[in-house]
Amino acid sequence: MMKSLVSDLNQERVVFLLFVLIFLIFALALPGFLNTQNLVLLMRGVSVLGILSVGMCIVVIGRGIDLSMVATMALSVAWALQLNADGMSLTMALTIGIASAVLVGLINGVLIAYAEIPPIFATLATGACVYGFGRFALIHSDLVYVTPAVGNLVELGQGRFLGLPMPVVVFAAVAALVGAILHFTKFGRFSYAVGDNYATARVSGVPIRHVLIGQYVLSSLVAFIAGLTQAMTVSSMNTRISDTLLIYDVILVVVLGGVGLSGGRGGIRNVIVGTLLIGTFLNGMTIMDVQFTVQNAIKAVILLVAITIDTLVNPRDEQTSQHGDI
């Protein structure tokens, strides 16, 4: 029986058991961890991280990575909020913000699919360009506040639905929608095919370039939703979030959850368990007043271990080194 239980374990289940273990340890050892206020804070923080991780999951399944997600999230939402504060209608401001995010995804996709630039370099460069150009030409200050002009949109971050904080609901909705796209649409099946074996997908007639562009456009759209949720939650958008290590938290969630960096493996359930584990871990370290730099060091070690394990479990092949290597 014990042998059967061990054989049934996979990375997703191991990570979920680790989450349960860490949650119980923190609940017993940390005063205030189970306070309602802290749990709400935990769920809100986990939600934005989870939404971003859903977007990252889409491109990692296709053997890619999107390091521009945080910059896209911050600058597109900050620009929309600023336009709205300057007098533009909310609908038009949001449309422009969404269009700017889509444009970034489109540029990433074209660079990777047609110019065949490795995703890590293409998205690193576009992320830097988005932040630099946005702060120089579009946005007046690092911090853009949410004004009363947004109206009921503020409920996206501060409201509740059936007793749950709205960011949790948004995370659940985005995860369900992307999960349905990955499993029940031709685009989703093509994404797994491209990630599993690029060469075979190409000779099988899969429109690889269109699929890659679609993945990066979709990840940018998810980044915009994450940013809008974050801004409505804290009543502002700080563009300097682009300079933080948030993108590494996102990668950590995806890899630790079990979405293989070699592509074609994993899904939304992996993102959810990874989000629960990392979100709880970060919350616990904050309650223990662990210094921010120490937290970053711990996360870096965990990320390094996770990538090493992923490399051993899902070894890269020749196609990976030629296409979509990160």
Image (cartoon, rainbow, N blue to C red):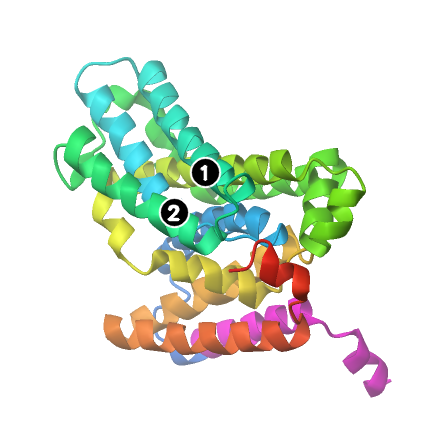
Q: Where residue 220 is drawn, which disc sits there? A: 1
> What's the residue at 67%, 59% (across, down)?
319
Residue 43, given in percent of the width and then of the height, sits at: 44, 53
> What's the residue at 45%, 55% (across, down)?
120
Say whether residue 89 is visible. yes
Magenta span: 1-27
Residue 178, given in percent of the width and then of the height, sits at: 61, 40
Q: Disc 1 vs disc 2: Cβ atoms closer than 8 Å?
A: yes
> What's the residue at 41%, 41% (across, down)?
226
Q: Amino acid at mark 2?
A: Ser
Residue occupying the far left of the picture: 140
Any magenta on residue 26? Answer: yes
**Quadrant location of the N terminus?**
bottom right
SS at mark 2? loop
> What's the residue at 30%, 69% (across, down)?
286
Decide: is 247 above or below 97: below
Q: Where residue 68 is drawn, which disc sits there? A: 2
